Each structure stands twice: as structure tokens, then as C-alpha cells.
Image (cartoon, grey):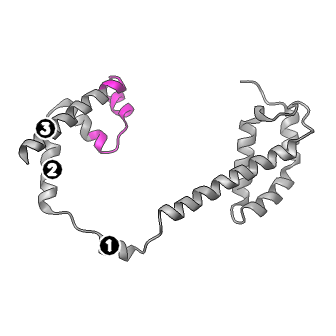
Amino acid sequence: MTNRPAAFDNAVMAYLPALKKLARKLANNDADELVQDTMAYVFSHWTNFRGEPSAPRNGMYNWLTLNMRSLAQGKRSVAANARKNMPKANESVLTSMATAPRQEDIAYANQVVRRLSRSREGRMLVRIGGGEMLKDVAAKRGIGVERVRQLTERARVRLVKTTKVAA
């Protein structure tokens, strides 16, 4: 990776007041965060600047503001989608809607976990079911990720067969 010219850094820092002003217009409460995100993006993607990085003159302001506007729009889209897809609900409503797990289901789940824990691939499947990643299980076992996937798939197939017989 090539080193970024000091002249590029100086030119970006010269536009910092203008970026802060634009950030206040684009993101009222998160203006400082938007400036920091823009600076991080610009410094990590400095090779995308089409001007001469060692002597940046033409187009630097436009390039900086374009990146800032793009980051601000991305943040707005994420926020809008979060509001649209995950509406905030009152906790009391959620607790009244929840149903307590049936004792039979809990006992059956415990039996399944116990049955899985008897074999190596079953124990791996239980760990993956608990939220561990394939690579973590593979590292702990000293085998490859693909082998862990194959073994857990075998355990899944065996589990489905045994639950069909039991049903």
C-alpha cells in the first residue's frame, strides 16, 4: 500500500470547517459523527480522488462533499429501514403477547440436546446452535471449517430421521 501524501492530508484538513458546516445541515444531531465518518472514509479511500493527490487543488471540495452526502444518505436509509421494519413496541404489550413455553417442549428440547451430545458431530451441532461460528468450532477441534459443516450436516440429517421416527 502506498503512503498518502502530506499535501492531501493538509488539503482535506483545510476543508474541515466547510465539512462541519455541511454536516450540520445534513445531520442535525449527528454532525460530529458524520464528519468523523467522512474523514475516515476519505482517508481510507484517498486513491479514489481523481485529482493529483500530491497537489490537490481542483475538485477536492466537490469530492469531499460528495462522499459526505453519500454517507449521510446511507445513514438516513438505515435509520428509515430500521423504523419501518422494527417498529418500537411497548414492553407491556410484548409481555402480554408472549406465551410461556410448554413444559413438554422444554423437556423434549432437553432430550434432543442430550441425544446430540452423545456424538462428536452432535456436540458440534449443539455448539453451533448455541451461536458459535463454524470457524470457532473448527479451531477448537483442530479441523477445517468444511469438515465441521459436513459433520454438523450429518448430525442434522440424523436428528431429522430420529424425530420423524419418534413422531
Image location of residue 94, percent across then percent down: 35, 71
Start and end of the magenta stretch? 127-147
**Residue 72: x, y in percent?**
69, 55
Q: Can residue 117 be seen in this snapshot?
A: no
Which disc number belongs to residue 150? none
Check disc 2 and give the amino acid type.
Answer: Asn
- Figure check: 162 above or below 66: above
Disc sitting over residue 161 in the figure: 3
Instruction: Looking at the picture, tell me which residue is in the foreground, 89 or 40.
Output: 89
Say which label, 3 or 1, has the lower sequence index. Answer: 1
- State the residue at coordinates (30%, 72%): 97
Look at 20% across and 30% down and name the residue there. 120
Gap between marks 3 and 1, in whole Å? 36 Å
In which quarter of the view is residue 47 placed? top right
Q: Nearer the viewer, mark 3 or mark 1?
A: 3
Left or right of residue 10, residue 142 in this image: left
Instruction: Say if mark 2 contacts mark 1, CB within 8 Å.
Output: no
Name the element at disc 2.
helix
Write down the residue under mark 2. Answer: 110
The residue carrying mark 1 is 95
Q: Earlier in the sequence, mark 2 or mark 1?
A: 1
User: Which residue is nearer to you in this view: 145 or 156?
Assistant: 156
> Which amino acid does the dot numbered 1 rest on?
Thr
Q: CA distance from mark 2 to mark 1?
A: 25 Å
